[in-house]
Image: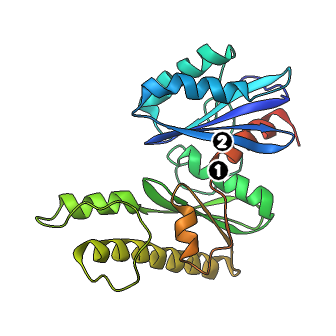
Amino acid sequence: MPRVETADALLAVDIGNTRIALGVWDSDGLHDAQRVEISRPDAWQATFESAWAAVGGSRRALVIGSVNPRETRRVQDALEGIAGVEALRVRDDLPLPMPLEIDNPDEVGVDRVCSAAAAHERIGGACAVASFGTALTVDCVSPEGRFLGGVILPGLDMSYRALHTQTAQLPLVTVERPNGVFGRNTHDAIVSGVTYGLLGALREIVERFASDLREWPQLVLTGGNAPMMAELAEFVDSVVPDLCLMGVALAYRRAAGQP
């Protein structure tokens, strides 16, 4: 892996399945986060230019975490053309930001490990991270800061699409807050069923994490739908929408030996 120099500021990039997230990390922490759809390459240029312009200091770095191999090279080329610096990719050029205790370390998503590492850095103890993206991932970190693995299940959008495409008459609905637990029409029944079903699964999963750890892990929600889900769940400890970007920045900082 290349030698990593300390930086005054860096642009952290998270390439997901449907969106690209970007945020600036410097002495003020993470800020100026923004997102652009992967399906809108016509909007990449302006978004990338705006993001890089917010990175100050004489020593600047560009760091990428990706779970979308098909789009990574294209996004990286566009970013490097704007920034004029070579990007470093977590896992390929930078070590993952925390040790793993799982069967196949190469299979776990960079986003899951980065989010877990960022959560543990702030909490300093056992924690669970639920990321509400295309899929819902729920991962567990030991009190000492080791990634223990977790679970993967369909997220909100994926669940709605599955109900629509795998049945003859159920409509396709979009993510929204339920109108109460009793669905008095088909639309509301789908929204309530999927939303409360995922929250029930989340509670059960975290309880089982706690039984195995012999202590209750702090539960952190992240991802675009995290704020709405947290409002409906009294067992959530915190919501950090940009947790993965913090973890991408953390991978660089640890590789460079920066506090």
Q: Position of residue 180 (x, y in %)?
A: 41, 82
Of residues 105 and 175, the one nearer the viewer is: 175
The residue lying at 68 percent from left, 13 percent from top is 84
Image quarter where the N terminus lies is: top right
Q: Residue at x 48, y 75 (%)?
A: 199
Q: Which mark is residue 242?
A: 1
State yes or no: discs 1 and 2 in contact (Cβ < 8 Å): yes
Q: Looking at the picture, does residue 62 appear above or below residue 253?
A: above
Q: Which mark is residue 33?
A: 2
Q: Secondary structure under badge 1?
A: loop
Tag 2: amino acid: Ala
Q: CA–CA distance between discs 1 and 2?
A: 8 Å
Q: Which mark is residue 112?
A: none
Q: Check the image and name the residue furthest to the left.
A: 168
Q: Quadrant of the C terminus?
A: top right
Q: Position of residue 210 (x, y in %)?
A: 63, 79
Q: Can you say whether 104 is above or below 179 in the image?
A: above
